[in-house]
Image (cartoon, rainbow, N blue to C red):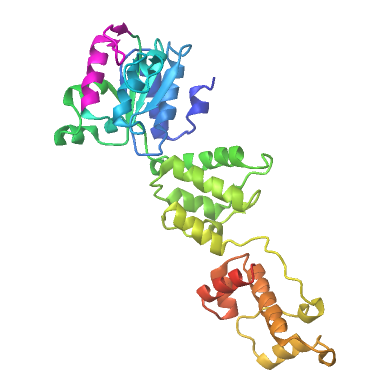
Amino acid sequence: MLNIDALLLGNSVPMQQVKRLIQQVAKSSASVLILGESGTGKELVAKALHQESDRCEYSYVPVNCGAIPAELLESELFGHEKGAFSGASSTKRGRFELADKGTLLLDEIGEMPLNMQVKLLRVLQEQVIDRVGSEKPRAINVRIIAATHQNLSDKVVSGGFREDLYYRLNVFPIQVPPLRDRGEDILLLWDFFAKSLSFDHDSPVTLSMDAAHELLQREWKGNCRELRNLVERMSILYPGKKITMQHLKPSSPKLLSEMMAEEAQTELVLLPQVATPPSLFAPLVVDKQPTNTQQLADVLVSGIDISQGCDLKQQLIAVETQLIQKALDATLGNVSKAADLLCVRRTTLIEKIKKYQL
């Protein structure tokens, strides 16, 4: 079992405050409401609460209220008897019974339908449940933790959440800070994710100073989840490498799919070489603006014995392929910079890369 510092990584002031609150409330049976943006680690806070409590020897049972269809939620939470409804071929214990004497996390509590909120309120007040299809109440002893990224007080005002349930759950609120407010915890988390996600655990991706500075300045709308995804992407693309600013581009926030599409075009590494006559290209040096195009042409054809015949189309393709390859090598696979070297549009270069399967 991990201790609280191993479970909740971070030395920043906001995270130290979260840990202190956990330790203060863990030994009680008070309901806890964990608040925070998506991806901040609310479920880890719930696990830490359970591990620090006197209930740690019993079950910790999480349930995502937003992931279960409304018509199935009652059965999932409270269980059902055999024959209670079509398809109920056997008796099933619900999450409350599974968590008896332990801890139940009601994640995304703000997504719970109003009719289920009424039933949950009764359970919290009376500490009994009724399985679907049963008239026999069952006593339960469960510590309730609820979590949400929504503003429940606003939902109460709008009628989307019951006020009495809100106050029943909000006995001890814990606000989990967003990643952008956690300072150098970002770098600590990078190291942790890099080691755990590395294919070769002895060679995780590391950060250059400018890249580290860039990460500390980001907004991190996806919080720890976004950071983990970034580390995983870098670990796949550049295993064992030091990540620089160039690797992190684009720096502006984009959807993951957009970023991956961009990387597929711009972060080309370990490109296969096309078999071409080495004597033809050995002297070639890529220059953005050759001072003498005729001299360059002379170099290109100097190794060709035209008396033996020559496939002009194939030779031109070979020249173009090798020039593109050399430009990509010179720019570490950056398509935009390679296009500048070759004096072509970036979109044109991308099409040629696809055409020649580079």
- Residue 332, can we see it? yes
**Residue at the image point whose x is 60% and y is 84% from the top:** 289
Give the image location of residue 296, x and y in percent: 70, 88
Residue 129 among those drawn in magenta? yes
The quarter holding residue 293 reads: bottom right
Q: Is 290 situated above or below 101?
A: below
Quadrant in which the C terminus appears: bottom right
Which residues, given as a range, are shown in magenta? 115-139
Q: Position of residue 37 (x, y in %)?
A: 34, 39
Classify 194 as above or below 314: above
| Residue 271 spot, x, y in % from top left | 67, 63
Q: Quadrant location of the N terminus?
A: top right
Q: Nearer the viewer, residue 133 or 63?
A: 133
Question: Which residue is found at the position 58% from the left and 42% from the top?
Answer: 194
Residue drawn at 15 percent across, 36 percent down: 158
Q: Is residue 259 magenta?
A: no
Horizontal placement of 311 versus 345: left or right? right
Q: Quadrant of residue 199?
A: top right
Residue 357, relative to residue 154: is it above or below? below
In screen coordinates, is 310 left or right of 215?
Answer: right
Task: Give how far across and how far down residue 41 sits, in percent.
Answer: 42, 34
Q: Is residue 183 visible?
A: no
